[in-house]
Image (spheres, grey):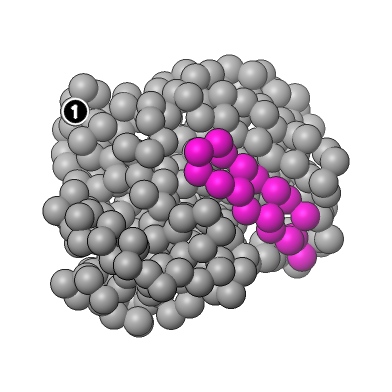
Amino acid sequence: MRLALFDDYRLGVVAGERIVDVTGILPAHDADPVSAGWWRALCRDFAGLRPALQAAAAAGPAVALTGVRLRAPALNPSKIIACASNYRAHVAEMHEVQHRTLGHVEDWMMNFDVFLKAPSALSGPGDDIVLPRQVLDAGQEIHHESELVVVIGAGGKDIPPGEAAGHVLGYTAGLDVTVRGPADRSRRKSYDTFAPLGPWITTADETGDPEGLVIDLVRNGEDHRQHSSVRDMITPVPAIVSYASRMMTLVPGDLIFTGAPPGVGPIRPGDVLETRISRIGSMTINVR
Ligand code: MN
């Protein structure tokens, strides 16, 4: 099932190029995006709500996706966890990037780990990435990182890898937009609009094993920068969920960016980025 947020934070089920408003079957809903409780409850209780969601989606009416404003399929997550150094070829290219943007290589940054990105950086699949004037004026590079994003269903603490699948609601696509240079990751990756997310959540039963997914990013319609299989991750999704949950309680609706495949590079005002993940969907995002 494909779950989307649209217009005034309504809940929709997407099929093909159409969407059905299923908000009416929710036990609670609030159009105020500050009120994330109903969304967290949906992420936690999805299995129980699923038959009613399916019935409402089948009953319709369905409207064209082009007639609605899709929002990021997340509402005030308690945190965005993100993975560093999770594809070998990306770790290799970061040696060159750090030489250019830092003047040296930080060895500790070449090892897999998790860090935090501000939830306020989220933006929707139809929203622009806004590059901060002060960063552009300073001549710093700002890069795209097109990543598979895990959406947490049932939360938990100290989750064993073998039980991780039971804590994943589904998957979506995200851009981990990043300033290169000498500062903490959380600051360089947390500007507003530095976390475009969408176009919707494809639930885990429909994606199948995430190892089978393929991530792409094309810049300006011709510059095919990223193309990788999720199978190439150093730390696979179940191990990521387990590792993160040993440090932080995972809350329903939390997001985990699973790390950049190789091919990251600078973006500039006027660029158009198409990010795509098989079995999920694609977003085309303008940079300004
Ligand atoms: Mn990243």
| Residue in the image at 49% along x and 19% along y | 231
Residue position marked by numbered label 1 in the rendering? 163
Q: Indicate whether 234 appears above or below 137.
A: above
- Write down the quadrant of residue 102 in the picture: top right
Q: Nearer the viewer, residue 11 or 72?
A: 11
**Rendering coords of residue 225 (x, y %):** 75, 34
Q: Residues within 10 Å of mark 1 (few under 14, many from 20)?
A: few
Q: Indicate whether 243 appears above or below 29.
A: above
- Judge whether residue 111 can be spotted in this image: no
Residue at the outermost front position = 59
| Residue in the image at 50% along x and 72% along y | 63
- Write down the quadrant of residue 196 in the picture: bottom right
Q: Which residues are magenta?
A: 272-288
Q: Nearer the viewer, residue 178 or 10?
A: 10
Q: Is residue 285 magenta?
A: yes
| Residue in the image at 21% along x and 35% along y | 166
Our reading of the magenta stretch's main secondary structure is: strand
Q: Secondary structure at mark 1?
A: helix
- Write down the quadrant of residue 81 in the picture: top left
